[in-house]
Image (tube, grey):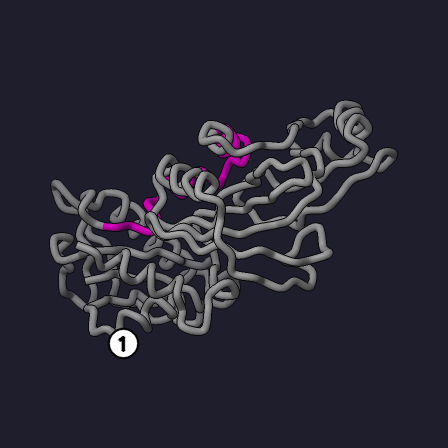
Amino acid sequence: MIVLHGLRTDTPLDDVRQVLADRGTPYLFVDQTACADAVVERTADRLVLVVGGRAVPVEDVRGIYLRPYDLGDAVDAAERRRLTRLTLDLREWAEAAPSSVRVVNRPSAGLSNHSKPRQSRVIAAVGFAVPETLLTTDPEAAAAFVAAHGGAIVKSISGTRSIVRTLAPGDDLAAVRWCPTQLQRFVAGVEYRVHAVGERLFAHRICSDAVDYRYGGFTLEPTDLPDDVADRCRALTATLGLELAGIDLRFGQDGRWYCWEVNTSPAYTCFDTGDRAIATALAEHLAQA
């Protein structure tokens, strides 16, 4: 059995559910909008998922895919607290699952994306280039970094989504004193997104004039990576303990392969093909004994 948790309207999750259904693979969907009968109970020696009054033995579970959302004001305060508790308990249950269970992704592994500076150390260790970086709350240090590189980009250092934007010498950087801010040297080149599902890779070249293609027009072109780059992607995914990863790469004009970060819960749908290749690979990965 495969256990899914999140929203039916979340396309990455529901695409996997549909593949499982089409193949007749048993699954349990713990839908955030219809899970009043779901709870994680604590016994003396383990956590037990109970749905509709029936326990789900972890021995019967092959894979777990967690993509919960904060529903915010879509539900009242009491329901929001209950759903938050359930999500936290399911994460704890998934973390405690034996190694024979494929968890996408174990919460402890997913935490790597909550600290971009920490993640960049792993990225460099597997052989990818990392652009010169400054993490600071000092406006003068930030201004000196931007001036030294003739410009820079700024982005979140946490897992919170942010819009990557450019900075130029002379820009007002006074606000960095209020929050640790990560600046990186801008690297000109071609953007790639690689989705790793276990050992399988799905790479796309991204064509866009925007600094952050997610907020500008872009086109996607499926592509093959050089063997050594593909090996680094697999090593990076394995080192971070991930079953599913969205890896952001750029092939710089200097001939080096740079890696920006590794998304530990990627919304891969716009990169998927008409035959749902990524969703299919993920469903197969979850169901693999």
Horizontal side of residue 74 vs 241, given as left or right: right
Q: Is residue 63 above or below residue 168?
A: below
Image x and y of residue 220, in percent: 58, 62
Specify whether residue 88 is in view.
no
Horizontal side of residue 251 vs 148, given as left or right: left
Which residue appears at 44% of the width and 56% of the height? Answer: 202
- State yes or no: residue 110 in magenta: yes
Q: Amino acid at mark 1?
A: Asp
Image x and y of residue 183, in percent: 68, 34
Q: How many marks overall?
A: 1
Horizontal side of residue 132 vs 144, given as left or right: left
Residue in the foreground of this view, choosing between 55 and 221: 221
- State yes or no: residue 171 in magenta: no
Image x and y of residue 86, in percent: 32, 55
Q: Bounds of the magenta span?
A: 102-121
For mark 1, what is the residue? 22
Which residue appears at 19% of the width and 68% of the height? Answer: 26
Specify whether residue 125 is in view.
yes
Which residue appears at 36% of the width and 44% of the height? Answer: 242
Which residue appears at 69% of the width and 60% of the height? Answer: 216
Magenta part, dominant SS? helix
Rendered image quadrant of residue 1: bottom left
Image x and y of residue 54, in percent: 14, 64
Q: Is residue 58 above or below residue 46?
A: below
Rendered image quadrant of residue 180: top right
Q: Quadrant of the C terminus?
A: bottom left
Residue in the foreground of this view, choosing between 92 and 83: 92
Horizontal side of residue 35 vs 216, given as left or right: left
